[in-house]
Image (cartoon, rainbow, N blue to C red):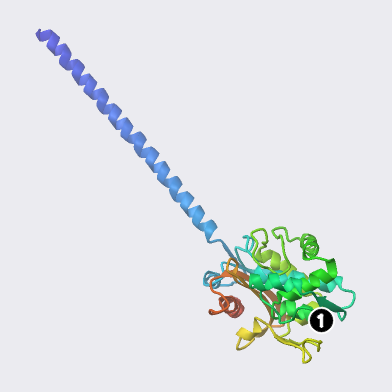
Amino acid sequence: MTAHRQKYKIKKKKIKRVRSILCVCAVCITTLFLSNYLINRINQKTESSVKSSKIIVADGVNQIVANNLYSSNAILIGLDDNHILLDKSSDERIYPASLTKIMTAIVAIENLPDLHEMIYLPENMFKKLYSEGASMAGFLPKENVEAIDLIYGVLLPSGAESCIGLAQAISGSERKYVKLMNEKAKKLGMKSTHFTNSTGLHDRNHYSTVNDIAKLLKYALQNDTFREVFTSKRHSTKATDLHPDGITFHSTMFKHMSTEEVNNGIIQGGKTGYTEEAKLCLASLAKIDGKEYILVTANAEGNPQTEQFNILDAFTVYNQTFENSAASK
């Protein structure tokens, strides 16, 4: 019995030793696994953080400028050399709202042989626009209006009836006119843009990017008529049978600005946009130190009754960007 017990004790000790070794191995393997897991998680979070806050800043522009914008999307480019000075999620899909009317206007200008021809505004198109709460220039049903006055009505007061009037006169229907708009977008390389209407009223299939809108605005500004309208603060239409004294339009951007001056320059023109889904948008043109720049911003909180954060962003970018650029030289 004694010998048997001795063998049993030795065997028991060996089993304990093996168990101890196995426990140590298990702890080591678990520790190694957890370490690798934590490292991977940290790397993933770091990469995700970098991607979500990706802002391209060039020429010494302070990143704080981009981070402090109310707009979630923005692009600032030099008109002469197409150089990007600031890019904040510029290829992210947005709803362009009334920035759409930049395309509506340039397509109309290019497809009208006579900008002084008279265009009739049929009564049936107004009812739908009124029901949708579309912004209006002030023309009336059954009014005859010069084409050029409708173009001013598109870009300055952002009149939906001006858009539809032009669309129907040129293409016979808004649907056919939108086809021209999408064809132009394709030719301009606006690969992330699709229009479903000429007014910018919300439709989930009506979208763009601030980068694409910048391409559009750069192209449109090469047209003298478009540039003249886009940079106007106000415009008085010619007399019509329903408006014997004409109508005076005011730019939806300039009317919210106490000054056009920025550091070493001036804001020359702009087109605002707003829908509940698109929020506050702005496409503007500025001349600073003798050079022209385009800024397109989108998706700023607020509405037409609040502070115009899209316009505040324009002043922030035009003032601080070039101030910081000069300081970095």
> Where, by quadrant of the figure, is residue 212 drawn?
bottom right
> Where, by quadrant of the figure, is residue 149 drawn?
bottom right
Location of the N terminus by quadrant is top left
Location of the C terminus by quadrant is bottom right
The vertical placement of 200 against 266, above or below, is above
> Where, by quadrant of the figure, is residue 178 drawn?
bottom right
Q: Is residue 220 left or right of residue 271?
A: right
Q: Residue furthest right?
A: 113
Q: Is residue 155 left or right of residue 300?
A: right
Q: Amino acid at mark 1?
A: Val
Q: How many marks?
A: 1
**Residue situated in front as seen by the camera: 292 or 285:** 285
Residue at the spot x=84%, y=66% of the render? 171
**Residue situated in front as seen by the camera: 23 or 6:** 23
| Callout 1 crowding tier (Cα within 10 Å): few <14, some 14–19, many ≥20 | many
Q: Is residue 10 left or right of residue 85?
A: left
Residue at the spot x=81%, y=81% of the render? 145
The vertical placement of 63 against 265, above or below, is above
Q: Position of residue 262 (x, y in %)?
A: 62, 84
Q: Position of residue 248 (x, y in %)?
A: 72, 88
Helix, strand or loop for disc 1:
strand
Q: Residue furthest bottom?
A: 245
Q: Position of residue 251 (x, y in %)?
A: 68, 83
Q: Position of residue 268 (x, y in %)?
A: 70, 83
Q: Which residue is mark 1?
A: 145
**Residue situated in front as seen by the camera: 194 or 16:** 194
Q: Evaluate whether residue 81 shows in this view.
A: no
Q: Evaluate whether residue 118 shows in this view.
A: yes
